[in-house]
Amino acid sequence: MSAFTLPSASLLSQSVLSGVFVGALYGLMGLGLSLSWGLLRLINLAHFAFAFLAAYLCYQMTTMHVDPLLTLIAIVPAFFAVGAALHWVMARFSVTPFNSLLLTFGLMGIVEAIIQTIWTADFRKLESSYGEMKFKVGGLFVPIPEFITLLLAVGISLAVWAVLRYTDLGKAMRAAAEDAPIASAFGVNQQRNALLLAGTCAALASIAGVCLALSFTLAPSQMYAWIGVVFAAVMLGGLGRALGPLIAGTLIGVSEAITMAVTAPSWAPIVSFTLLIVILVLRPGKAA
Amino acid sequence: MKRTPIFILGVGVLLAFVPKLGLPAFYDSLLYLMLHWIVLATSWNMLSGYTGYFSFGHGAFFGAGLYTTSTLLARYDWPFLWTLPVAALVAALLGVALGAVVFRVKSVRGELFALLTLAITFVIGTIVVNTPLDGGNGVSLAAVPVPAIGPTPSSTFYLLALAAATLTMLIAWAIFVSKFGAGLFAIHDDEDAAEVMGVPTYRYKLLALAISCALAGVAGGIHALFLSYVTVGEVFTITVPLTVVLMSVLGGTRHWAGPAVGAVAITGLLYSFTAADHAVAGKAMIGVILIAAILFMPDGILLRVQKLFRKRAATPGVTHPPSKPPAQDAARPAVGAAGDVLLQVRGLQKSFKGVRALTGVDVDVRRGEILGLLGPNGSGKSTFINVVTGHFMPTAGQIVFEGRELAGQPAHRIAAAGIARTYQIPRPFAHLSVLDNVALATMFGGAVHDVAAARRQAMTWLEFTGLVEKATARPDDLNLHQRKFLELARALASKPRLVLLDEVLCGLTPSEIDDAVALIRRIRDQGSTIVFVEHVMRAVMALTDRIVVFNHGVLLAEGSATDVMQRPEVMTAYLGSPHKELAHA
Amino acid sequence: MLEVRDLQVAYGAAPALWGVSLDVRDGELLCVVGPNGAGKTTLINTIAGILRARSGRLVFGGHDVTALPPHRFCEAGIAVVPEGRRLFTGMSVLENLELGSYLSPAKAHRKESLAAALALFPALKEKLASPAGELSGGQQQMVAIARALMARPRLLLLDEPSLGLSPLIVRDMFAAIRRINAGGVSVLMVEQNVVMAMEVSTRAYVLEEGRIVAEGAPDELLARPEIQRAYLGV
């Protein structure tokens, strides 16, 4: 076990900054999950599968010389459709919320197998024109791909927040999550809204996947490493809240970064889990 | 049913002779894997299938056992067989540590528990990879000698796994037929109701978790030497949890042998893939089968098959009704004379997030009486029952029953003290038969330990309430009247001295109400004291010795029914402003 | 305006209404009274579309609405003030009101409806931004009624509006309901508080154990032994 070492101020600030960036990705990954769990009462483990599949598809398209961000044009609608279709199937078979967990668990296994078959277990790194670019702000380096992720995460979270807060559709979704029969009694068509939301959550996962591909090396087994920390961000941020995952994710990312700077990189996963246990023990009502 | 353990042991012994057949090592390995998965899936099912707390972290405990063994072997040169009990212990301790924290938090049910346990797999993996336990390079056990239990090393592993599997199946069966198992299944269906009926839910969950983890640890220990080179990446992944969930769901989580059926089926299937070099497709196959199982067969294969057989033959395991009903046991002997104060409530308060449901209730319940609890909607009657029986904790006040202070006690202790209740909307355990629903109450509220004896006693209660023909039916098959009587039978089965009935007549037709009234009288004549919340006024008039009227969380009036209902303040509470004509009518 | 014919409604295996028939005439303020367990909430929820009837018919404004999906009832012109208010407690009072006028025809008139609702319940003006869950029982009831009004219904359903409220607040609320009715909205109210209910309505039914047992003008019904027996048992 490495001894504790106190890093220099500039190293620490660079670490915190990279923590912010990775935290933004946690938040973006967690957004769809949080909305699905909080507003639809469905825990969709396939969310991670969608994200990784999108990441691999993005990678594949860049090998054909398509700019990674342009791949979003094809990817987002495709995953929207897939998400809505999945929800439709589960509604059609009246799958209980708990069984939806099992079902999407199975789906995760299938998608991993598909990824492994097509792209093998080798590590894949996306090559793009701005992959290595970075700019300097003050004494700190800001890598472009991570910066793009941060912008997307903040922008999308704010957009979702605004929709939920200010539009009638957003209010209808929130109302239906609280009391579906009464929302219905005032004209809210929850079946249709749920399909819309499920599709949106899958689309959000796909965007997170593309961001993932921009900054990280891909391997099928990596999918599972994100589960713990993203769920922690979702639960800490409060279910169904648009800005929650982003804020919690940033908190976790920065905590991890500081831990890594002070001890060793491999201890990072402990941070989120510990935070989660602590929150659950101290404020049990918050998560559920 | 004692034949089953003998059968399991017999099969175990028989299979021990397989290595003598001199089959190629390939078969030893295949059989080893099947047994290995039988242990993992069956042990998983003991917690997750029986109680419904699906754990996605079985890999963590399996891995803990695996690494305990490998560390003891590689670093400390322990003899292999001695590492196995230690592996079991370490895994169990890990599980109990997690459970002790997580089971206390009421909101960590179902989905949350699953996710937490999923996360813990990676956390443990991280810890292992960062410490000298693995250090990132894996642990090589090539130099460790395999004990010569069988003619060849591969047959040794087969025999070890066989022993573990036999042990696991025996334990799974033993739990299934015991009082402990009945409690676990009750927790699965309705944890709160189980707690109120006397099941010590926290303790039971921890025990099931400990046993489940210990067995997984043993499987891990054996597997460590089997692999002879262990790495974190192979062990602390999602493969183990995903596979055991599938095997158990496919085979049937509500039966002790279900996971084993699933394990054999899936291992066979997977092996045909790996043999043909399509390991990855195997993983996809698991996912597909799991999804198909959830969509089309959520109860599993075994139960489907059982259902087919149940429709034809009579159900075994339920004793036919005794030829002559034994004399009705009175409620446990009453201590003290009729008319003594049995329950004394003083200053009882209960607030929910600022709303005061009970604002200081004082009431006495006398032994042997039938006390009616009345009051308009929202006056606090149901809250009163919920607080007295321990479903909710009081905010303030005292509840003294037969001289013992009960306020603040967990519900299962209050049940054990001799208080029982029915729910306004019946809450039977949906997956248990009518008889088992009542037997559960006998075992936990009435402190009967032997399952067969509990079933016999339960039968007498079914006779008392006229439900004998429905003994083997599921609660879903009963109509409302019968379900309410089932609630009554359950409440009575723990032989309580005080029974609290919550709107037991609501929704019944007039003739059914007459039956129920007669039944309630018989219950009192048997020696129980009854408090009942009711709105059906003619029942209240006919049955009660005394009534109390609640209003806005306090007692408004007390006395005989005819007297109290004519008092102006009571009429105001019910009808609105006092109406002079009504008072004179 | 509303015809209910032979309504049979059950909760799973438990029947709650046994062939209930009643009429609400245009512009009427009608009361259904009955003790607990009589089936009043079941009746309201079925007319509001929240529950589905096992058999029977609901004809509203000449259209058979019995088989409509739940979210189409509001469109038809029926709005409900459910038992226990059932506000969206996590959302603000204003958002609750806005949800009342979720559908387009009501949405177009949202500003007017809001102004009218606030004129009826001035106490809500300061509470618009507060989370609905933080209001007192009486205020919540006002929000619930206002929410239903925002839908600009032709028929307003009220389920035990006086539940858990003090007599003074109940009096004010019933006065507001009278004003709403005077504005042209038909009202069907189920209540436990018999005397108050009878004071505001022009006609009443008595529901007992899932069946209508009496019908008539309030003062006539009040004097009848049925009411006394049903409620007080004496």
Image (cartoon, coloured by chain):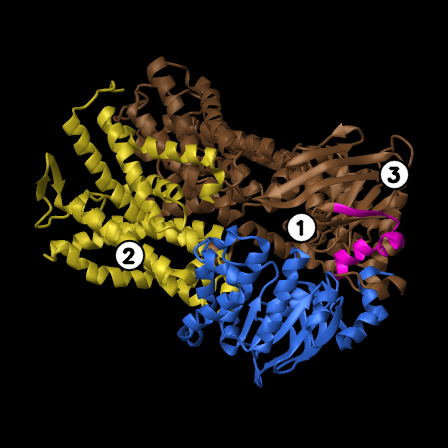
Q: Colour of chain C?
A: blue
The amino acid at mark 3 is Ala
A146 and B564: which one is in front?
A: B564
Which chain did the renderer colour yellow?
A
Q: Secondary structure at mark 1?
A: loop
Q: Which residue is mark 2?
A: A159
Please tell me in which quadrant of the rendered image residue B333 appears: top right
Please tell me in which quadrant of the rendered image residue C199 appears: bottom right
Q: Residue furthest bottom?
A: C62
Q: Which residue is mark 1?
A: B427
Q: What's drawn in magenta, residue-wise?
A: B555-576
Which chain did the renderer colour brown?
B
Q: Secondary structure at mark 3?
A: loop
Residue that appears at 47% across and 56% down: C127
Residue that appears at 25% across and 26% down: B137
* Cα distance in 3D space between marks 3 and 2: 69 Å
Let me know if residue A265 appears in the view: no
Q: Is residue B335 left or right of residue A143?
A: right
Point out residue C47 in the picture as x, y percentages from the top left corner: 61, 73
